[in-house]
Image (tube, helix red, strand yellow):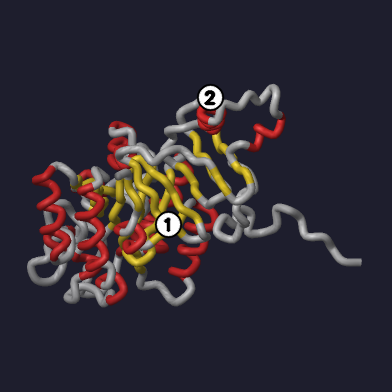
Amino acid sequence: MTDSVPIHDTPILGMTSRPLVPQPVEYGDPKSNNFWVEYPNGLVDLSRSTHLKELKNSAEKQLDIDPSKDPGAQNILHAGSKTITPTLLPGQLEISVNGGRTVRLDTEKTAVVIIDMQNFFLHKDLRNHPKGLACVDPLMRVVPFLREKDVKILWVNWGLTTAELSTIPPSLVRGFAKHGSPRGGGFGSELPGDFGKLLMRGEKNSELYGPLQGLYEDGREKGTDFWIHKNRISGLWDQTLLDNFLKENGLMTLFFAGVNADQCVLGTLIDAYFKGYDCILIEDATATTSPDGAFESVIYNAGNSYGFVTSTENVISSKGWD
């Protein structure tokens, strides 16, 4: 006897491998302002601008259809291979993501969260991280593009205060304590040369790596870029500076990039997912020093469970309102 495969077999979510939806579907509370709509043409609308019911009513008026007299009008939003979707509005972008989908977002509600691209993790005198260094050029290209689209640029970095040193749990202290290593004896310890105290605010090792520091400073002057300190692997582990900033600015859709993919980036992304933010990982702007398989696991789960995966090329070639 052959066992039947349950509908919800693992992976439970499997969003990149799912077939396209046969009819438009709205996710979330239809009475709230927190919802997505997915369409049969592969569009996943994260903009929260048009409920499915509103779109259907608009289409019926435009086509002069009375659904009470024409039962077939219930499928008006998807007839054959043609799908009716909301008009792309000013301030919205459509970006290709893995799984044959396209996400539509509202740039005023969107930020890119760039994590730990700091000297401590990337500078050749402190670390051998060629894959992390390979993320610099993609970020140098995509950040200016997103700035022009009014997407906020959030540089989320380790930056400890003396008071915070006593609040860090022993598991985390142990992880950063490199006994006898030139990279220091843990948080607040002196690093070689002029790098200063390990991951303390204002120290050279806590600055962004190379050209990224200048990129941030340019954006800071323009009012588009913001430096946000964190004191845990995740930037969203509690009521953090990052969470407060996101809420105060009405941000719901988050791009993620940085190092290390399977540690601080993933920790922040998962907490964002738990808190209800839309999560989009930029694959070629994310890296890790972990063994083979770790990065692939992050990409797999980011696209199949927590949200979406895209590339800087897809972002830069995105479709906007004309």
In the picture, the quarter occupied by the C terminus is top left
Q: Is residue 241 above or below residue 140?
A: above
Please, what is the three-letter code of the amino acid marked with disc 1? Ser
Question: Which of the pair 93/126 is nearer the observer?
Answer: 93
Q: Is residue 278 above or below residue 15?
A: above
Tell whether label 2 touches label 1 (CB within 8 Å).
no
Q: Quadrant of residue 5?
A: bottom right
| Residue lying at 13% horizontally and 64% vertically, measured from the top left | 211
| Residue lying at 63% horizontally and 48% vertically, measured from the top left | 80
Q: Is 276 placed left or right of 243 in the picture?
A: right
- Give x and y (percent) for residue 281: 40, 57
Circle on res. 141: none
Q: Is 197 placed left or right of 315 in the picture?
A: left
Please, what is the three-letter code of the amino acid marked with disc 2? Lys
| Residue lying at 30% horizontally and 65% vertically, measured from the top left | 177
In the picture, the quarter occupied by the N terminus is bottom right
Q: Return the disc, 1 or 2, that comes first in the chain's sequence.
A: 2
Q: Quadrant of residue 266?
A: bottom left
Q: Is residue 175 visible?
A: no
Callout 1 crowding tier (Cα within 10 Å): few <14, some 14–19, many ≥20: many
Q: Is 78 placed left or right of 277 in the picture?
A: right
- Give x and y (percent) for residue 240: 32, 40
Element at label 2? loop
Q: Is residue 106 visible?
A: yes
| Residue lying at 17% horizontally and 64% vertically, measured from the top left | 209
Which residue, as the protein is rendered here, is positioned at the far front?
Answer: 64
Residue identifier under label 2? 31
Q: How far separated are the C-alphas under marks 1 and 2?
A: 28 Å
Residue identifier under label 1? 96
